Image (tube, rainbow, N blue to C red):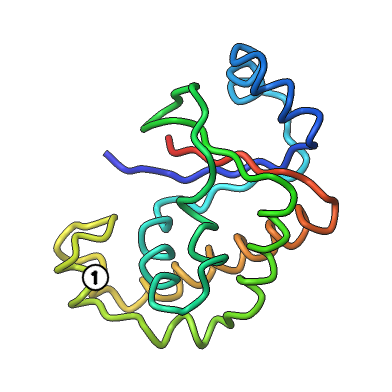
Amino acid sequence: MSVVACFHAVTETQLATFLKDPSALVAFLESDQPKANSINIDQAADGIQYLLSQHNCPEANTAVLGGTKTATEVGYGPVRYLRVAEVSAIARGLSSISEEQLGEHFSPEEMQEACIEPNPDWFWEDEDSLDYLLKNYLKLVEFYQKAASEKNAVLQYET
């Protein structure tokens, strides 16, 4: 089974409502209504997190698996949130790491040995796997930049 990482930008007012009323958070996440600034980075979360962890940038390291846990469980664990100041710091941190810099730490052997998902025996050896990670990394950078410019908080979860 594959884990997909999802991200939604929300206002601080929405976040406060969701923290006070978990059923409102679940309704928001399960709604078929399009969400203005939302992305998923498919199954690239572990790979991106692994590559980000190779950089000395604590702010960027919280982009994928950071945040404060809520009591609401969705998919593979709790929904996590980041406040506006945290989102701004992450956006700055991610902006300081280029695609090329991120890709410098790509090592199929090390990633497979570390059981970085997705982890079928062949995945990290595929010639397109780095492109897959970088494409999703750019989506993540753009998402955080937009959320920061709009002074939004962020919800993160895995399905």
Residue at 49% across, 34% down: 69
Give the camera-side residue of 156 and 59.
59
Position above or below: 58 against 63: below
Residue at 67% across, 22% down: 18
Q: Amino acid at mark 1?
A: Met
Q: How many marks?
A: 1
- Determine the secondary structure under disc 1: helix
Residue at 23% across, 75% down: 125
Quarter of the image that includes the N terminus: top left
Q: Quadrant of residue 88?
A: bottom right
Position above or below: 140 against 70: below
Position above or below: 147 against 76: below
Quarter of the image that includes the C terminus: top left
Across and down, in percent, residue 21 comes to 65, 13
Q: Quadrant of residue 23?
A: top right
Left or right: 114 as drawn, with respect to 12: left
Position above or below: 91 against 1: below
Which residue carries the number 1 mark?
A: 111
Across and down, in percent, residue 113 comes to 14, 68
Residue at 14% across, 63% down: 121
Across and down, in percent, residue 126 comes to 28, 73
Across and down, in percent, residue 52 comes to 45, 71
> Label 1: how many residues lie within 10 Å, few (<14), some (14-19) or many (20+)?
many
